[in-house]
Image (spheres, rainbow, N blue to C red):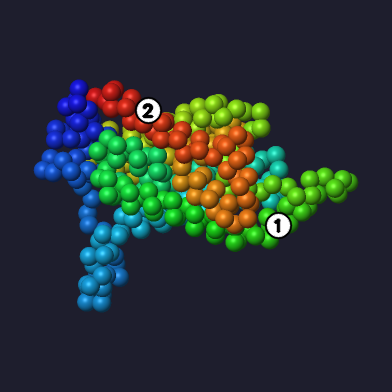
């Protein structure tokens, strides 16, 4: 059984499904190739100024995948949180905010993948990174670097969105919900711009299941649509497919759990809001809900990985 698992995930044997990410090279089973062999990353500036940047080349080569992961996660979370903030503070979006937010997050993922995705970077999701590392589809040191890049990028994204929407959020908080009732909700909550919460009547078990199922579908799409079936060629349609999948999942599950499906997207902005003045409420609200968007996506991604490996042909 262990040999079969290594064959599926890409151990010393050939991958049972060449289209499954995580196939190891045949000469070194410690070096996973998630998208097939990729050409060395070359900077146009470095190519035109080889003497100037030659001394930086070792560092640039080492840091390039982590920088890509940082930039991609920053774009994804910044655009997504920006959509949240715009929908929250724009009175004209009331009643349409669920669709706008779902489409916004989906296209944010597509944009981020289009910018940095190579087949070996572009996860933007600690749940995906952890599961790939657990199944030896990603080296542990590289996985740790990706995790740090994702968390730091999401934290920076939250700070940037807060800075850009500072006046809008302040105005929203102190604007009466109804002009004829100026005392109604004089200090409306805004932390949900940055973090996720389930509806007040949804219990945490249901929210956990929602986050797990959503991430399971996302991981399944990642594993099956990353490359053309039966080849090691990266699918150029993957960014769009992943983005549309996220949009549909958010339409389905956002009301149930907030639809994070990504520990970095929720935890790093939650930490930022705690530091920036929203207080401990962001960790204690809804029965201490904060840990569910961290654990449930990992469980969902792991289930998807196991099921796909069992039924790969």
Considering only order in the chain, which callout, 1 or 2, is on the residue closer to the N terminus?
A: 1
Q: Position of residue 92 (x, y in %)?
A: 72, 48
- In this figure, which residue is indicated by the disc labeled 1? 170
Badge 1: few (under 14), some or many (20 or more) residues near its Cα, within 10 Å? Answer: some
Q: Nearer the viewer, residue 190 or 54?
A: 190
The total number of labels drawn is: 2
Q: Compared to 179, does 161 lie above or below?
A: below
Q: Which mark is on residue 291? A: none
> Which numbered disc covers residue 303?
2
Quadrant of the image containing the C terminus: top left
Q: Is residue 239 visible?
A: no
Q: Residue at x 44, y 51 (%)?
A: 151
Alpha carbon distance from label 2 to label 1: 42 Å
Decide: is 3 above or below 294: above
Residue at 54% x, 60% y is: 160
Q: Position of residue 183 (x, y in %)?
A: 85, 48
- Numbered disc 1: secondary structure: helix
- What's the residue at 59%, 57% (across, down)? 276
Which residue is painted at 28% across and 64% down in the image?
A: 60
Asked where in the image residue 102 lies, by quadrant, the reply is top right
Residue 259 relative to residue 70: left or right: right
Q: Give the left or right position of residue 274, taking residue 231 as reference.
A: right
Helix, strand or loop for disc 2: helix
Q: Quadrant of the N terminus?
A: top left
Query: At which x and y percent is residue 50?
Result: 22, 73
Q: Position of residue 138 (x, y in %)?
A: 27, 43
């Amino acid at each position: 059984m262990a040999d079969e698992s290594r064959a599926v995930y890409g151990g010393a044997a050939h991958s049972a499904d060449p289209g499954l990410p995580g196939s190891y090279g045949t000469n070194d089973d410690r070096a996973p190739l998630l998208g097939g062999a990729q050409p060395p990353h070359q900077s146009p500036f470095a190519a035109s100024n080889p003497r100037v940047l030659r001394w930086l080349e070792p560092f640039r080569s080492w840091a390039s995948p982590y920088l890509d992961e940082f930039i991609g996660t920053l774009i994804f979370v910044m655009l997504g949180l920006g959509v949240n903030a715009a929908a929250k503070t724009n009175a004209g979006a009331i009643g349409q905010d669920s669709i706008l937010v779902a489409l916004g997050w989906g296209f944010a993922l597509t944009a981020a993948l289009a910018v940095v995705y190579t087949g070996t970077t572009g996860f933007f999701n600690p749940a995906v990174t952890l599961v790939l590392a657990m199944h030896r589809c990603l080296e542990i040191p590289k996985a740790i670097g990706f995790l740090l890049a994702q968390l730091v990028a999401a934290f920076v994204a939250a700070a940037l969105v807060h800075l850009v929407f500072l006046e809008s959020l302040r105005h929203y908080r102190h604007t009466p919900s109804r002009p004829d009732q100026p005392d109604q909700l004089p200090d409306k909550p805004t932390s949900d711009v940055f973090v996720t919460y389930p509806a007040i009547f949804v219990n945490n078990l249901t929210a956990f299941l929602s986050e797990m199922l959503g991430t399971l579908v996302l991981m399944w799409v990642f594993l099956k649509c990353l490359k053309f079936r039966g080849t090691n060629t990266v699918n150029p349609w993957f960014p769009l497919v992943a983005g549309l999948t996220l949009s549909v999942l958010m339409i389905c599950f956002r009301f149930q759990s907030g639809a994070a499906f990504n520990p970095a997207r929720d935890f790093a902005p939650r930490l930022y809001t705690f530091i920036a003045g929203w207080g401990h409420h962001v960790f204690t609200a809804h029965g201490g809900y904060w840990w569910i968007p961290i654990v449930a996506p990992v469980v969902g991604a792991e289930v998807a990985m196991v099921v796909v490996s069992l039924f790969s042909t």
